Image: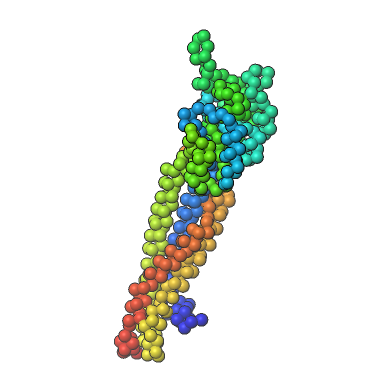
């Protein structure tokens, strides 16, 4: 052990006649620990919210949406899907149709987005199957596009939507669409009865309340679109953060007449606000750690006053200003390091407990998710620990320099 560290440790652990310095040292450690713990919990909360919302949003929307510039139906699906599906970085490409409808059951009704999907592709590449509480995608696949009462097409509803309409598996729901048909009486809205074959729960309250799924063939028939066409081609990629570059390359491969949007563009304001909020949290709690670090300054100033005689003796024995400087800087770093380690352990443990047992509940109607998620990232913990130790180091500079400049003659004059 280096001489400076040995002396610093002895100063911190030796018994004293005055108990004020050890008490202030303990308060400094507790202050640093509390600040570090608060910072880790705050960053875990911010990261948890961002990751949870992102995961649930990516369930509800595709990574990239490819559509026509004129908003018309996309034809020639098989060659287009072949060109897109084999592109490097693309995990899957699936044709879908969705539009606003009005669902009615008994004396209850609710607006919703009706989405037509290919059940076979969804089973292989989508996430709907993992979110199903009741029913199966196979039931949706077996349900045909016929609108006859004897053979009803199947529909999968969000849990909140099913509860709002008081529907269960096997019940019938009627859908109304503005995409109707011309008749001698004018434009007649489209009407179709569906049989509930599944109920899903994504965890996003707004999505579970407003979305429903039918087969692609049923949506084509209901929305009066040609067979073998789609409104959008949904693309999922292996790297969700590379969608901007991939979408541009897909447009070049798809040819003229197409446009593309991706999940980052659609949710940029939300994630920008979350990023800014995380930065604000970090800066705010850093200020708390700085306030706690002032106790280190107090501890070292009182230590210098108490150890005047010892500093004079060390100087007389040949210790340089640099040796004395290091002794008191190491004392502050030891206090800061102990507090940082304790706060890091507590912060990670508390965050894990809060997330594991979902102790903080939320109103899903307001926050879209039912509980507060916490997700600790190793990079965040390292950043917090580095920041706390750096602040502790800066707090040692003034008292350490004061001790190093102490005149040994003045220190030993009355000894």
Q: Quadrant of residue 116?
A: top right
Asked if residue 133 is positioned above or below residue 271 in the image, the reply reads above
Q: Quadrant of the C terminus?
A: bottom left
Q: Position of residue 18 (x, y in %)?
A: 41, 77
| Viewer-side residue, 233 vs 52 | 233
Residue drawn at the location 53% of the way across and 46% of the way down: 240
Q: Position of residue 178 (x, y in %)?
A: 50, 21
Q: Is residue 106 visible?
A: no
Q: Is residue 348 visible?
A: yes
| Viewer-side residue, 228 vs 198 | 228
Q: Position of residue 189 (x, y in %)?
A: 52, 17
Give the number of callouts. Answer: 0
Residue drawn at the location 59% of the way across and 36% of the way down: 81
Q: Quadrant of residue 221?
A: top right
Asked if residue 188 is positioned above or below residue 282 in the image, the reply reads above
Q: Position of residue 118 (x, y in %)?
A: 62, 32
Asked if residue 50 is positioned above or below residue 306 in the image, the reply reads above
Residue drawn at the location 51% of the way across and 48% of the way down: 241
Left or right: where does residue 312 sit relative to residue 361?
left
């Amino acid at each position: 052990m280096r001489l400076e560290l040995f002396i610093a440790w002895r100063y911190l652990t030796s018994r004293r006649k005055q108990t004020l310095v050890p008490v202030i040292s303990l308060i400094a450690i507790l202050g640093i620990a509390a600040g570090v713990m608060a910072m880790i919990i705050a960053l875990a909360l911010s990261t948890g919210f961002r990751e949870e919302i992102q995961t649930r949003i990516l369930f509800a929307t595709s990574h990239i949406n490819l559509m026509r510039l004129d908003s018309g139906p996309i034809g020639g699906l098989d060659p287009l899907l072949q060109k897109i599906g084999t592109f490097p970085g693309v995990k899957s490409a699936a044709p879908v149709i969705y539009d606003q409808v009005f669902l009615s059951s008994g004396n209850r009704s609710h607006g919703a987005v009706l989405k037509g999907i290919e059940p076979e592709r969804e089973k292989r590449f989508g996430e709907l199957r993992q979110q199903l509480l009741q029913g199966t995608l196979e039931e949706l696949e077996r349900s045909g596009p016929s609108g006859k009462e004897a053979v009803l097409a199947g529909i999968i509803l969000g849990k909140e939507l099913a509860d709002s309409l008081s529907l269960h598996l096997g019940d019938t729901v009627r859908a109304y669409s503005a995409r109707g048909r011309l008749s001698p009486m004018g434009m007649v809205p489209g009407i179709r009865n569906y049989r509930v074959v599944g109920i899903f729960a994504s965890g996003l309250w707004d999505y579970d309340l407003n979305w429903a799924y039918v087969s692609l063939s049923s949506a084509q028939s209901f929305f009066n679109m040609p067979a073998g066409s789609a409104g959008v081609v949904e693309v999922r990629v292996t790297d969700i953060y590379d969608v901007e570059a991939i979408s541009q390359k897909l447009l070049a491969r798809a040819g003229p007449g197409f446009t593309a949007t991706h999940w980052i563009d659609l949710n940029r304001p939300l994630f920008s606000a979350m990023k800014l909020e995380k930065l604000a949290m970090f800066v705010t709690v850093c200020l708390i750690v700085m306030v706690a670090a002032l106790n280190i300054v107090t501890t070292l100033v009182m230590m210098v006053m108490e150890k005047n005689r010892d500093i004079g003796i060390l100087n007389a024995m040949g210790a340089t200003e640099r040796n004395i400087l290091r002794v008191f800087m190491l004392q502050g770093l030891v206090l800061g390091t102990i507090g940082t380690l304790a706060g890091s352990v507590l912060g990670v443990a508390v965050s894990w407990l809060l997330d594991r047992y979902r102790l903080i509940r939320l109103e899903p109607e307001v926050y879209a998710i039912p509980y507060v998620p916490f997700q600790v990232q190793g990079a965040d913990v390292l950043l917090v620990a580095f920041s706390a130790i750096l602040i502790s180091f800066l707090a040692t500079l003034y008292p350490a320099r004061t001790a190093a400049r102490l005149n040994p003659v003045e220190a030993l004059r009355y000894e």
